Image (cartoon, helix red, strand yellow):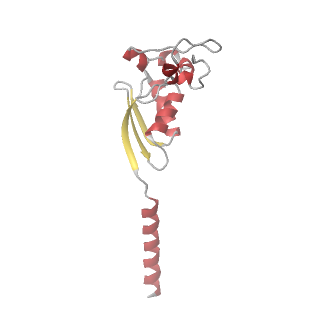
Amino acid sequence: MKTLSLFAAILFSIFSINTSTAQSANTETIKVWGNCGMCKTTIEKSAKKAGAKTAEWNEDSKELKVSYTVNKTSSAKIQEAIAKSGYDTQDFTAVQTAYDNLHGCCKYDRKAAAAGDVKKCCTPGEKCSMDAADCKKMECCKDKTCCKS
């Protein structure tokens, strides 16, 4: 009888541990600009480093299929990490310096260029001629030091 009780307690413990550690998983498709196999490697590594369980980028469709645990990361964190590595995503635009550091074959048509609304930031130390409201929306002006007041 003691053996049966002990066995039941162990089973109950195992079941309790498994259900309490179960975490909500999410799978989604994210648009990521890029060109080649080197892009694929960098994009997938960046996504995994940001907490994605799986990441598979398709060179032709420019879509990244990711799955991740909601408690550990988010789509925004994954996209931000990818943008920091130099690649534009559907919600984040890579800073120009990160894009400039990409290998020559990885230079893709930027999403802003494709949309026809490219705005240039001023170079460091130069006074910006853009309206402050427009400048604040741009990634390269986050420090607001070049925005016209």
Q: Residue at x 44, y 48 (%)?
A: 70
Residue extending furthest right?
125
Q: Is residue 27 above or below residue 121?
A: below
Q: Is residue 73 above or below residue 109?
A: below
Q: Is residue 19 above or below residue 3?
A: above
Residue extending furthest front?
149
Q: Which of the two residues, 27 or 111, is positioned nearer the viewer here?
A: 111
**Taking 66 as reference, is 133 left or right?**
right
Q: Position of residue 53 (x, y in %)?
A: 45, 44
Q: Assign the C terminus to one quadrant of the image.
A: top right
Residue extending furthest bottom?
1
Q: Position of residue 128 (x, y in %)?
A: 57, 13
Q: Residue at x 54, y 11 (%)?
A: 129
Q: Position of residue 80 (x, y in %)?
A: 50, 33
Q: Which of the two residues, 95 or 10, is positioned nearer the viewer here?
A: 95
Which quadrant holds residue 34?
top left
Number of residue marks: 0
**Taking 110 as reference, is 98 left or right?**
right
Q: Position of residue 103 (x, y in %)?
A: 53, 18
Q: Is residue 54 above or below residue 8?
A: above
Q: Assign the N terminus to one quadrant of the image.
A: bottom left
Q: Residue at x 46, y 29 (%)?
A: 92
Q: Residue at x 48, y 17 (%)?
A: 107
